[in-house]
Amino acid sequence: MTMDRLRNLGFVLAFLTLGFILFCLYAAFQTAIINGNWVAFLGGILMGAVLVGILLKVMLVPDRRSTGWVKSITNVNAKYLFGFLLIAWFAAMGLLATLDLEATKVGGLALLGMFAGIFIFMGFIWAVIGE
């Protein structure tokens, strides 16, 4: 297959995945609206939009010249910064686990903690390997 065909196949796969996810989430969105839980519904949409914005900004960095915040986390001492962030993440997730709240196990805090952990771990790996 040529690269154009693979790219087009990737677009189709992304479109089908988006449709599948929207179809699956329709009932959850409908339940949130019917039950009058507008604050949680709009908060979820806002957090998703912020996450997409952060990911977009991060993914567009290679297309531009290096920026100030990139230089600050890619210097020699970045491994210490991300090491400290890892310890803080472990402590925060451990604290949430000891509270034994249902919302921290399956709710928004667990999702935010997972995303934060991914970014922190990837930053730590990047800082250590990049030396």
Image (cartoon, helix red, strand yellow):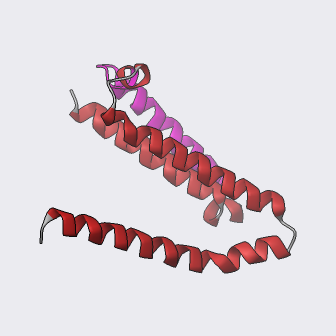
- At 35% from the left and 67% from the top, the residue drawn is 11
List x then y, in percent, for residue 33.
81, 71
Residue at image x 35%, y 43%?
A: 122
Q: Which secondary structure is most common in the magenta stretch?
A: helix
Residue 94, image x, y percentages: 57, 49
Residue 70 sits in which quadrant?
Answer: top left
Furthest-left residue in this view: 1
x, y (%) of residue 53?
54, 44
4 lies left or right of 100: left
Quarter containing the C terminus:
top left
Residue drawn 43% across and 23% down?
69
Compared to residue 69, the image places residue 63 above or below, namely below
19 lies left or right of 63: right
Is residue 129 in sight in this rendering? Answer: yes
Q: Which residues make up the magenta segment?
A: 72-98
* Position of the N terminus by quadrant: bottom left
* Viewer-nearest residue: 86 or 60: 60
Number of numbered discs visible in the structure rendering: 0
Nearer to me, 109 or 97: 109
Choose between 3 and 81: the one closer to the eye.
3
Q: Position of residue 24 (x, y in %)?
A: 58, 79
Res. 125 image quadrant: top left
Q: Was residue 75 drawn as part of the magenta stretch in this picture?
A: yes
Residue drawn at 57 percent across, 74 percent down: 22
Residue 80 vs 45, above or below: the answer is above
Q: Is residue 97 magenta?
A: yes
